[in-house]
Amino acid sequence: MSLFSRYMFRQVTNAFLVIVLTLTSVVWLATALKELDLITSQGQGFWLFMQMTALTLPSLVALIAPNAVLMAVLYTLDRMNGDSESIVMTAAGAPVWRLAAPLIGLAAIVSVLILLANVFLNPACMRALRGFITQVRADLISQVLQPGRFSSPEAGLTFHIRDRSPAGELLGLLVHDERDTKQVMSYLAERGRIFSNDEGSYLVMFEGYVHRFDGEDKDKAVQIVAFDQNMLDLTEFSPKGDAGKELRPRERPIGALISPDPNDKLAISNYGQLRSELHDRLVTPLYPLVFVFVAIALMGHARTTRESRWGQILAAFAIAVALRVAGLTAGNLVALSAWAVVLVYAIPVGAILIAAWTAHVRMSPELRSKLNFELKLQPKKIMFWAGRGMQTE
C-alpha cells in the first residue's frame, strides 16, 4: 500500500471498529436485559448468565458487521470529500480504484472473518448455548420455586423457600413430601442447592431437620432427625424422552449440512431447511463487498464541498436494504426449491458487477463523456432512420 492508501485504510478501519463495537454493545445489552430472568426468577448464577449471553456475540457481530462496513465507508468517503482530500487526489490524477482499494480491502477482511464465523464459530456457540438452555430447563425446581410462595410440581410434594442467594442457593428451604401416605416427610433446611450430573438432578440440603410421621397412625409420635447434609432425588421431575435432542440447522456443523446423515429426521422430512442454512452461511460474507461497491459507486467520485451528499448517503442505504431484503427472500425460496440457489448468489454478485461498472464509468471522464455522447446521439439516429423509412415509402 502507498502512504495515502495506508492512511485511508486506517481511517476506515477505525470508523468500522467504533461502529461495530457500539452497535454490538447496544444489541447485546438489549438481549442481555431480556435474559435477566435467569437470575431474578430462575435462580441461576451470574457466571452462567454471562456465559449464555456471551455465546450470542459471534452471531450478533456477523449480523452487524456488513452494516457497520457500509456506515464506515460512507462516513470515510464523506469526511474525506469534506476535507478536500478526495478532490486533491483526483486532481493529482489518482485512478478511481486507488482510492477504493483500501475500502475493498477492509470489506474483504470482514468477509473472510464472517465466513470463518459462519462455518466454524457460530455453530459451535449455538450448540454450547443449547447445552446451557437445556441445563436451565432441566433444573425444574429453579423454574417452579418462587421466594415466599408454596409450589407443587406434583400432587403430594410441596416446596417453599424464603429467598435466593446471589450464588443461586435456596435459603430457608421447606420440602413437604406426602406422596407415600405410609410415611410423610417434611424437610427444613437453612439452605439448599441443586446439582446435576449424567445420572440426574439432586437437591442437597444443608443444616436442617427432617420430620417423619406415620400417615396412617395419627397417634404415633413424630420423629425428628437433625442432619448436616441430606439429599433428595429430583431426577423424576426432569424432562422425559429424547425430544429436543435433534440439532437445529443453525447448530449443525457445515459438514452435516453438506452431507447429512441418511437417517436424519430433518433431512428426510424437510431437507430444504438444511439447504437454505448452508447457502445462507456461504453467501452472507459477500454482502460487505456488495455494500462497499454500492458506496463507492454513489460517493467515490470527488464533489465540491458546497454540495450536500445526504441524498447519495440515503440512496446508498436504500439500495443496501433492498439488496439485503432480496437476498433474504431468495434464501427463503431456497428452502422451497433448489432452483433459487442460483438467485441467492446472482443477487450479490450481480450487484457487485453493476456497482463496479457504474463507479468506473462515473469516475472515468473519457467513458462518461463517450456514454453521454452516445446517449445524445441515439435520438438523432432514430430520427434519421425513421426519415429514410418514410422516404422509401
Image (tube, grey):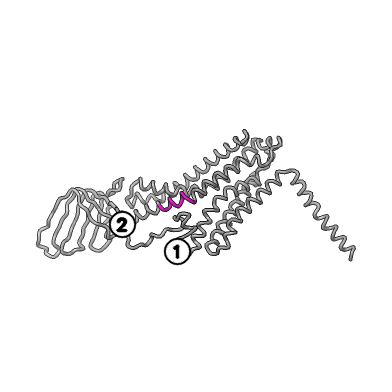
Say if the magenta span includes residue 319: no
- What residue range appears in magenta? 119-127
Q: Is the magenta stretch mostly helix, strand or loop?
A: helix
Identified by mark 2, the residue type is Leu
User: From this viewpoint, is residue 199 visible?
Assistant: yes
Residue 175 shown left or right of residue 392 in the figure: left
* Residue at the disc numbered 2: 140
Q: Is residue 271 above or below residue 371?
A: below
Whether residue 307 appears in this view of the structure is: no
Q: Distance between the residues labelled 1 and 2?
A: 35 Å
The percent position of residue 223, horizontal first and vertical second, equals 12, 56
In this rendering, the answer to whether 362 lies above or below 157 is above
Q: Residue at x 51, y 53 (%)?
A: 281
Q: On the picture, is 38 further left or further right than 341?
A: left
Q: Position of residue 276 (x, y in %)?
A: 52, 59
Q: Quick one: label 2, few (<14), some, or many (20+) residues within 10 Å?
A: some
Pointer 1 with pointer 2, Cβ within 8 A:
no
Q: Which residue sits at x=48%, y=54%? A: 254
Lower position in the chain sequence, tag 1 or tag 2:
2
The correct choice, above or below, for 122 with respect to 19 in the image is below
Q: Quadrant of residue 393?
A: bottom right
The residue that label 1 is drawn on is 262
